[in-house]
Image: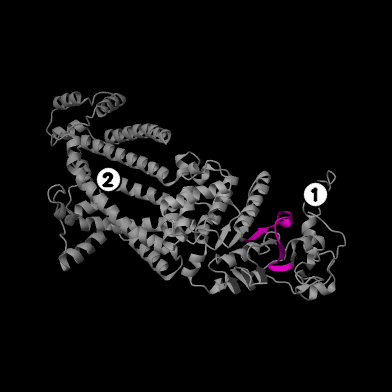
Amino acid sequence: MLNFVARRLLAMLPVLLAVSLLTFLIASLLPGDLALVILGDQATPENVAALRRDMGLDQPLWWRYLSWLGHVLQGDLGRSYRTGQTVLQAVAERIPVSLQLMLMAEFIGLLIGVPVAIACAARAGGAFDRFMTGSAFAMLSMPSFLTAILLIYLFAVELRWLPATGYVPFTEEPLASLRFFVLPALTLALAEWPGIMRVLRSDMIATLQEDYIALAKAKGLKPSRILFVHALKPSSLTLVTVTGINIGRLLGGTLIVESIFALPGIGRLLVGAIYTRDLVILQGVVLLVACGFVIVNFIVDMLYAVLDPRIRHGHA
Amino acid sequence: MSAPLLAIEDVAVELPTPRGNLRAVDHVDLSLQAGRTLGIVGESGCGKTMLSRAVLQLLPKKAKLTGRVMFDGQDLVRLAPESLRRLRGRDLAVVFQDPMTSLNPVLTIGTQLMETIQEHLELDAPAAKARSIELLAAVGIPAPEQRLVQYPHQCSGGMRQRIAIAIALSCEPKLLIADEPTTALDVTIQAQILDLLAREQRRRHMAMIIITHDLGVVAGRADEVAVMYAGRVVERAPTQALFKRMHMPYTEALLAAIPKLDAAPHTPLPAISGRPPDPTRPLKGCSFAPRCNYAGRHCHAAKPVLTSAEMPDHVYACFHPIRMTEGMEA
């Protein structure tokens, strides 16, 4: 098992290196001179040249990459030339919002998707299965801005149960914070559960054909034990993958939902950085988000091993 | 004789296929007394596995089952799901053909043993664990305590089949159905597993059905043998009588198809030519007639029914029964 963890960790290194290179190139290859952007139209060529020297923009690309990478490895991702905030400060300020949104959205998504998938697989082809598969398809094709507006109309405007916009940190007022996040999280979850449901449903249906399920029935086990213990665990590998990808994606922020519900998350930070050509923030945040994605995938790999002993022992 | 433990009465199984209904089991009658062993023999696709699944009520959802399966005084076909569940695993156990797929790959051997015990017997976890260790030891697994925390993939095929047998035996069933229990195993392991089944059967006084394509497997181990062909029982007799005086040409052909150790090198094996009939297109006459060396015109026109020979418990379905005067040992 330790060997397995070490191998996976080692495999992450080249991925992270490639991510850093790509992130750097994206920011560096954008057209336009950064020094000129900072100084504005009125800058003299001498000023621009001086700033370029200061920022190291006159150095060759590979040298700039290596020196940036060196700083990153020491924990210095740079500082916004506009606000003076470091990348880490900016991200630390925004990440609780995106994290809370992600956790709540995934929780609600799994809460809907998993039971529905199991119920559908248990009676595949039945009325409930056909209805839910159809509904999932309809949900999947609904854009999140539409879902958001419908939810706001229903729960905030008509029923007045939940606030439409606003934000308080969870650490200050947990309950109020949760209330603010219900609608945005639900908006995301309504787009997530169909994927969760379809993946788990088809894996469950395949698992239920297995010999060991027939044996579990022949052993006289309760139907619930057959479904939840014998069938769910071996069917959940793809589910874990999908959830991991969802989490990674939501970590990077969700621009549309954050904008509609006025949540100060990573998504809005990134878009702000793009609009203001704040390249230091842009490349720093993209790098951190990508690292988060890689780490989530590493956790998914570990979960595989937890779920399937054959992977743990290097048999599959 | 007392009422049989298991009575299969006029059981037929039909499976819908795109090419029409497939009659997998065609009106079979069989019975088995407590503590006895019945061998069901036939080639692939003859319906023997479908018959066992019909007894276990584990047929595919779309399958249509008619007839009665009387087990211990109850008709399993009409039993409520909850009563059936309580019966399965406790009184009625099964060992499947392939131990590579019949154990759950993500659950430990201990879990898979103990869940059956705890489902049916009123035992707490430590007692169930002790019983599991006992069972594993009984089926010949060394260091049983360590095996409990292992997963199926950490055991060899023979070992897994022993574990599957331990699971089947765990609640002292009255009837054990062993569906080709050795087909997926190495030849060297096969005899061990069969001997293990026979030994445990005697010790626990349970009835057993051994399903196999190999007449050699049932030869010394079954009290009675039923030969199946194209979904029907075509000959049924006490094992001794069957091997001494088989009447059905198909039984003879099956026996001839077993390689003999004392045959000269390069002796061709007398395989049964042709294939079993298409089960979606039932024949008017005897289903074996197209492949039979003895078939006459009558055989293609009408279906022979099971009739008894000189002994009432030896029945066969053939218009031209063969009679062998010499005894034959497999």
Q: Residue B167 versus residue A292: which sits nearer the camera?
A: B167
The answer to whether residue A149 is visible is yes
Where residue B119 sits, quadrant-wise, is: bottom left
Q: In the visual, does A238 lie left or right of B13?
A: left
The answer to whether residue B160 is visible is no
Chain containing mark 2: A
Q: Residue sitting at 41 percent across and 64 percent down?
A: A120
Tell me the crowding category of disc 2: few under 14, some 14 to 19, or many 20 or more residues within 10 angstroms, Cα based. Answer: many
Q: Residue B76 versus residue A115: which sits nearer the camera?
A: B76
Task: Residue at the far right: name it.
Answer: B325
Residue A48, image x and y in percent?
Answer: 16, 27
Marks 2/1 in contact by CB < 8 Å: the verdict is no
Quadrant placement of the N terminus of chain A? top left
Q: Residue A98 versus residue A56: which sits nearer the camera?
A: A98
B290 over A40 or under it: above or below = below
Tell me which segment is drawn in magenta: B207-235
Residue B148, image x and y in percent?
Answer: 48, 45
Identify the element where label 2 is drawn.
Answer: helix
